[in-house]
Amino acid sequence: MSQMPQLSACPSCEEPLESGDLFCGACGFDLSAVPPRPDVSPNGSSGAAGTAAPDGEPSEWPVAPEVDSSDTPVPAHLPTDLPGTDSAGGELPADAHAVAPEAGEDPGEPDEYALPAPAPAAPAPVPAPEPAPEPASAPAAADPRTTAPDATPPTGTKLCVACRSGRVDPDGYCENCGHAQPRERDHMEQELDTVAAVSDRGLRHHRNEDAFAISTAALADGSPAVVAIVCDGVSSATRPDAASLAASRAANESLLTALPRGTHPQQAMHEAILAAAEAVNALAAEPATAREHSPHQNAPACTLVGAVVAGGLLVVGWVGDSRAYWVPDDRGGPTVRLTEDDSWAAQMVAAGLMSEAEAYADDRAHAITGWLGADAYELEPHTASFKPDRAGVVVVCTDGLWNYAEAVEEMADAVPADAAARPLHSAQVLVGHALDGGGHDNVTVAVVPFPFVPQGAGSA
């Protein structure tokens, strides 16, 4: 059994003590908390360390001498003063070893010379608590790049044009591969029962400046009429995409109005070109503020080519260098170009100054001499009518196609043999032909089947 320490002064406040005092009369310090002085120190001297208890309990931590040789109190060092880790391997918090102040001690001023309290007896082992079950986490979101899309997407879901399987989000990107989707006019397709058209931005242009309009109408006698209009915006002009769109819509609406009234298709085509010119001219009437910001803008401009198939008659009309071709189904007859370009090269050939090959090899070949727009020199709509003697198709296109099939033989080879039965497929094939050739320009193609009419066969 431990003996009471013989102290002459309170370890807490240094108040003189009397023999047998259990508490300090000044600060109330519990004197029994001071460990007894052992008889033998670890190095053989007396009064420096605790000895083993008679019952075999482990000895207490050795106590540092109260003073050193200079009579200066020596601070005690405890095991808890050494850095350590908790049971999980992490560093202990900075206040893990803090000792609560004794009764009567000012917690704001730590006592550097207070003697350590005796080590408490080891508590009985307590079973470790069962680890609390981790809360069920929400399932991780599937990576859309590696997740297979639904086998049957909901009706109306827009699919990616690149991977053909991912859904397109409202921002215009594929949720599966992240591919940016084309703008509406970058690639357009339309199919009716008797006509189809395809337009594509191409591989080099930043936007599609072409436009088309296809439709059907009934003549005054009730017979059907098919209309195809193709326009190519002049890239050097302001807002060429707006010009081509306005011209194609205006020409188509004019034809759908004139044909049912009994207007001859060729006259209706002439009027349609004039209506298209007025629509493009109207685009030049910009607010004064627009001209202030861009004083060097020129007027919007475009070319136009159109075809009408009605009552065994084929009518074409054009301004500029967009073209129309006649391709017979059986290829027994010749493929014919139905239009003449309003271009520098065409003028050189017509004047006999250059051969066609020489003219179109010149850098000035595609400089147009006629167009629709407010700054056009003089509008001269061209129209022509034909009565083919066999079935075939009319290919109405911009130079984005015929640049890769300039000769009529090349155009005949590019048009599929079943073009009359599958006009949309044929238009897609022709656009693909231009893209495979380099796709340097926007490309737009309309394919109009021409059924054979025995009566009135022959050429007009």
Image (tube, rainbow, N blue to C red):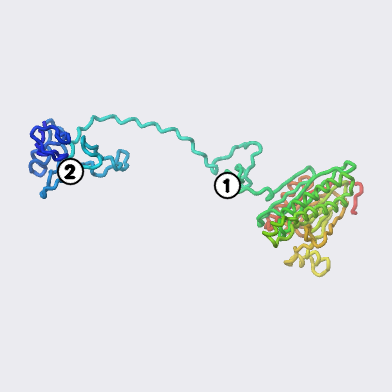
Say which of 175 and 291 sits in front. Answer: 291
Q: Is residue 45 above or below residue 437?
A: above
| Residue 113, label in figure | 2
Q: Which residue lies most toward the right here? A: 456
Residue 327 in view (yes/no): no
Label 1, secondary structure: give it: loop
Crowd around label 2: few <14 · some 14–19 · many ≥20 (10 Å): some
**Going 90% across and 54% down the picture, which residue do you hit?**
460
**Going 84% across and 57% down the picture, which residue do you hit?**
381
Left or right of 418 in this view: 27? left
- Residue denoted by label 1: 178
| Residue 215, label in figure | none
Quarter of the image for residue 4 reads: top left
Under mark 2, the amino acid is Tyr
Under mark 1, the amino acid is Gly
Q: Is residue 46 above or below residue 335?
A: above
Where is residue 63? Give x, y as percent: 15, 41
Left or right of 426 in this view: 84? left
Where is residue 153? Give x, y as percent: 62, 37
Say which of 423 and 255 sits in front. Answer: 255
Q: In which quadrant will I find the N terminus?
A: top left
Residue 394 in view (yes/no): yes
Left or right of 295 in this view: 33? left
**Going 74% across and 49% down the picture, which residue do you hit?**
427
Where is residue 343? Give x, y as percent: 78, 63
Crowd around label 1: few <14 · some 14–19 · many ≥20 (10 Å): some
Real-space CA distance between mark 1 and mark 2, rounded to the nearest whole angstrom:
70 Å
Judge depth for marks 1 and 2 and give the one in front.
2
Say which of 326 and 17 sits in front. Answer: 17
Number of marks in the rendered image: 2
